[in-house]
Image (cartoon, rainbow, N blue to C red):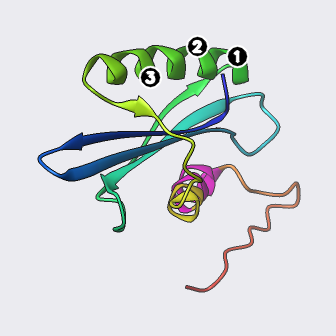
Amino acid sequence: MSRNLCLTRQCLGLVTRIECAIRPLAGDTGMWTLLFAAGMAGEQPSAIKAQGPFPGPNAAETILDTIVQSLTLHGYELADDPQIWCLHMQAQLREINGGRCRSVDGFEFRPLH
């Protein structure tokens, strides 16, 4: 299974979109997370969620496969659409990694917003 997926569902003329991504967590711990962005197609995502951590990409892929199976039972279909909310998911990953990005000497880089 791919580490980046997009699912869509049409209902009453509206298209709901869910993007999924599997990403490693900071700190070289071998832990991975699932990231999800959901909302109406053509708009900003209305929800950004993460699940995990998981001990490696294979464990995360197994959970993602289970989630995709459940979503397809509810009318979602895999789409070949490119991910349009990857920056939103990257921001969520940065937030998750906030406490993990420390160097050996204790200095922590935090860019200004």
Which residue is located at x 70 percent, y 16 percent? 58
Q: How many neighbours does mark 2 have within 10 angstroms: few (below 14), some (14-19), or many (20 or more)?
A: few
Q: Is residue 93 magenta?
A: yes
> Which region shows up in magenta?
91-99
Question: What whole-number distance in Å separates the C-alpha atoms at marks 1 and 2?
Answer: 6 Å
Residue identified by numbered label 2: 62
Residue identified by numbered label 3: 68
Question: What whole-number distance in Å separates the C-alpha atoms at marks 2 and 3?
Answer: 10 Å
Check disc 3 and give the amino acid type: Val
Q: Nearer the viewer, residue 68 or 87?
A: 68
- Quarter of the image for residue 34 reads top right
Which residue is located at x 36 percent, y 66 percent? 42
Foreground: disc 3 or disc 1: 3
Left-right relation of 82 to 104: left
- Residue 58, which numbered label? 1
Pointers 1 and 2 in contact (C-beta within 8 Å): yes
Check disc 2 and give the amino acid type: Thr
Q: Nearer the viewer, residue 1 or 81?
A: 81
Foreground: disc 2 or disc 3: 3
Left-right relation of 17 to 101: left
- Quarter of the image for residue 105 reads bottom right
